[in-house]
Image: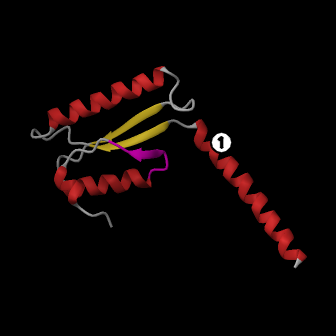
Amino acid sequence: MRTTSVRARHIAAFLVVGISFTFRTVHAADAVFGQIASTTHPASKANAEGLISGIQVYFASVNAKGGVNGRLVKLKSLDDGLEPKRMAELTETLIADSSVLGLVGYLNTPGLLLRLP
């Protein structure tokens, strides 16, 4: 019984150290948000460019005040050409990218209706 208790404490200590290390690593990086919007298709170009500009202006305002907990907020915008399947593929790419904290400001209604695998 005592061996199990000692193991449990070692595992708990290891997890605490691992979580602390992970938090410090993430804390030091920029806060990157991913976006998919068609900047090349004529039907959505103006809307996409306006949305991207609006997000960047807001992020610049946040960064001018020191960012979020000292982290600069950045936008990683990808162009799907207004193709639903391309939007899904690019979204998977953003999700797989460990530097991307979250997703924001999507444009492409048909692409939003697709299910990701």
Query: If the image is split into quadrants, where does the N terminus sit?
Result: bottom right
The answer to whether residue 79 is above or below residue 113 is: above
Out of 82 and 15, give the one closest to the viewer: 15
Out of 90 and 13, give the one closest to the viewer: 13
User: Please, what is the three-letter code of the amino acid marked with disc 1?
Assistant: Arg
Identify the residue shown where x is 88% and y is 75%: 3
- Compared across the picture, whether 93 is left or right of 110 comes to right
The image shows residue 102 at horizontal and vertical percentages of 42, 46
Instruction: Return the residue found at the far right.
Output: 2
The image shows residue 72 at horizontal and vertical percentages of 50, 30
Q: Which residue is mark 1?
A: 24
Query: If the image is split into quadrants, where does the C terminus sit?
Result: bottom left
The image shows residue 108 at horizontal and vertical percentages of 19, 48
Question: How crowded is the residue under tag 1: few (<14 C-alpha within 10 Å), some, or many (20+)?
Answer: few
Does residue 45 belong to the magenta stretch? no
What residue span does the magenta drawing correspond to?
97-104
Give SS at disc 1.
helix
The answer to whether residue 2 is above or below residue 43 is: below
- Compared across the picture, whether 8 is left or right of 71 comes to right
The answer to whether residue 105 is above or below residue 5 is: above
